[in-house]
Amino acid sequence: MDCSEIRKEQLKGFGFIKKENPCYRNGEYFNLNKKIGQGGYWLYDYKGLFAISIHDFYFFNDFYFSTDMYVDEDPKYLSISYNIDITGDFLDSKLNIRNNSINGFLYGENRICALIKNNTPVYSISIEIYPKYYEELTKRFGLEKNYLKNALLTFKSDTDFYEMMILLQEITSFKGIGLSAELFYESKVTEAVALLLAKVEEENIYVSNKEYQEIKDINKYILNNLDRNISQKELCEKFFMGKTKLQTQFKKVNNLTISEFIKLNKIEKSKTLLKDNTMSIKDISKQLGYPSQSRFTEVFKESTNILPSEYRNIHCL
């Protein structure tokens, strides 16, 4: 399944129905099913190279959703989004999604998990860059294999990235069709990539392939040992890394401190166990290394705004 098909399957799963395009611009338009909400989703997909989308809708009732994980060696696509109004409880805090902010997202490595409250708006503009596009850029400019991917990985969220905000806003006001639209949208994608790389280089937040892989190995080690408390000293000794370098590189790659990463992934693991419905909440808390069920319940409620028992009831109907 290619990137475009994945996107359309997601839209269908969220309740969007393809309609005749009322936007008088190139691309496709999807209406939200009138039984569950109001508004729509415009999608311009260009020859398997990139896509541009505008999201403007709201749900009548609270709506829980998460993006599916299609994890390959490389992500399916890279995304740059301007979240103008995107009110909701984002249960995966790694992305730090806020109103009036620019976010970088790697589909296939990042996961969005959110509870959108009833009658609250979702309005955002996104550029999605598919593998074919960034692979061609890599060859053309002789870049390190994952240069663009790593640049987006290290750029997470920014409320002061005004140049990118202006660029993405310009997309909403353009009404051209045909060749003029193709040229306009392609130029905006190229400009967005240039702005992103300039931002990363200016702020010196880029991570190399070697640094990226080192932290990914540490991530894997942590995920395989969620049943116990792992100290920074243990990680430094096992991966032959100084404390300062560990903290700095870990935050660059994950946009989380080590303790935040452990907490988040324990919660994600607990969600899987709660959905399975074969273990008691007390046993789940023990398996994830919490000192007591009450402490696990406290952390879970703090992270998700609901109790473990409530989460289980929602997902085990």
Image (cartoon, grey):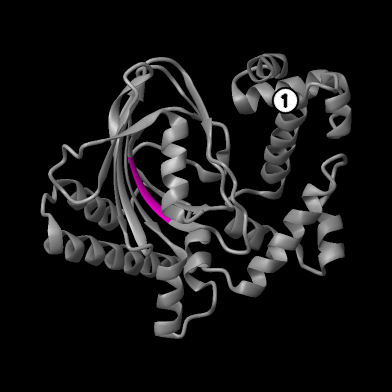
Residue 38 image-quadrant placement: top left
Depth check, front residue: 182 or 234: 182
Residue 312 belongs to magenta span: no
Residue 100 image-quadrant placement: top left
Task: Tell me if I can see residue 205 in this picture.
Answer: no
Residue 218 percent across, percent down from the top left: 76, 59
Q: Which residue shows up at 45% across the image and 82% down it?
A: 139
Q: Residues within 10 Å of mark 1 (few under 14, many from 20)?
A: some
Residue 241 percent across, percent down from the top left: 78, 68
Q: Which residue shows up at 37% across the image and 64% down it?
A: 49
Query: Callout 1, which amino acid?
Result: Lys
Q: Specify whether 275 is left or right of 91.
A: right
Q: How many marks?
A: 1
141 w.r.t. 310: above or below: below
Q: Main secondary structure of the magenta part?
A: strand
Depth check, front residue: 129 or 153: 129
Depth check, front residue: 152 or 252: 152
Q: Which residue shows up at 68% across the image and 58% down it?
A: 247
Q: Which residue shows up at 65% across the image and 70% down it?
A: 211
The quadrant of the image that shows the C terminus is top right
Report the magenta residues as a range. 79-83
Q: Secondary structure at mark 1?
A: helix
81 w.r.t. 200: above or below: above
Task: Tell me if I can see residue 10 in this picture.
Answer: yes
Q: Specify whether 23 is left or right of 122.
A: left
Residue 118 percent across, percent down from the top left: 40, 17
54 w.r.t. 254: above or below: above
Q: Specify whether 185 is left or right of 116.
A: left
State the residue position of label 1.
275
Depth check, front residue: 152 or 43: 43
